[in-house]
Amino acid sequence: DRVIKWLRRRLKRAADENISNLKFSCMEAQGFIPNIAPDSVNIFHIYFPDPWPKRRHHSRRLIDEKFLTLLLEKTAPGGSIYLATDDSDYFKQMQKSAALLKGEFESRLSHERMIGPIKTTYETKFASAGLILNYMEIKKK
């Protein structure tokens, strides 16, 4: 995360739960991901990135073809990228970006969480507000 407040909360939670196999970094994902070795990550989780809903801000969105290509390069064969958003326009953009990807992969869509029972703060908040949640998995072959 790039916001120190959230990093501090996650550090405390990890310490409270005695979880030691985590690393935290205060930076944008675009600055962090290029430093990861190719084919080395089993799962990327990107839930509820800022949708930048105003048309003039769409270029600031994290998920696009270029970023998904970078993630796939870092994903190990058989690994996955999990995405979630409550913004239907952003979800359509995510789908279009995934359709432009090259290489061996498959994607699936759902309105139900695809992996793990733990929900993010935004996920809980949006679900309790009755919003439709959109999930995507991109699995590298």
Image: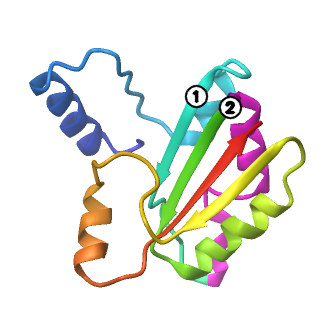
Q: Residue furthest left?
A: 16
Expressed as whole percent of the image width and height from the top left, the position of residue 89 reads 61, 81
Position of 72 with respect to 121 (left or right) is right
Q: Is 12 on the left or on the right of 109, as rendered?
A: left
Q: Secondary structure at mark 2?
A: strand
- In this figure, which residue is indicated by the disc labeled 2? 78
Q: Give the secondary structure at mark 1.
A: strand
Q: Amino acid at mark 2?
A: Gly
Left or right: residue 70 versus residue 116 is: right
Name the N-terminal-most of marks 2 and 1: 1
Does residue 57 appear anywhere in the picture?
no
Quarter of the rendering containing residue 10: top left
The residue that mark 1 highlights is 42
Q: Is residue 58 magenta?
A: yes
* In magenta segment, residue 66: yes
Q: Magenta span covers which residues? A: 55-78
Q: Position of residue 17 (x, y in %)?
A: 13, 26
Query: Measured along the vertical axis of the image, is residue 43 above or below residue 56?
Result: above
Mark 2 and mark 1 in contact? Answer it, CB < 8 Å: yes
The residue at 43%/48% (across/down) is: 115
Q: Is residue 55 visible?
A: yes
Q: Mark 2 to mark 1: distance in Å?
A: 7 Å
Quadrant in which the N terminus is drawn: top left
For label 2, the crowd category at 10 Å Cα-Cα, with few meaning under 14, some 14 to 19 and many 20 or more, is few
Q: Quadrant of residue 123?
A: bottom left
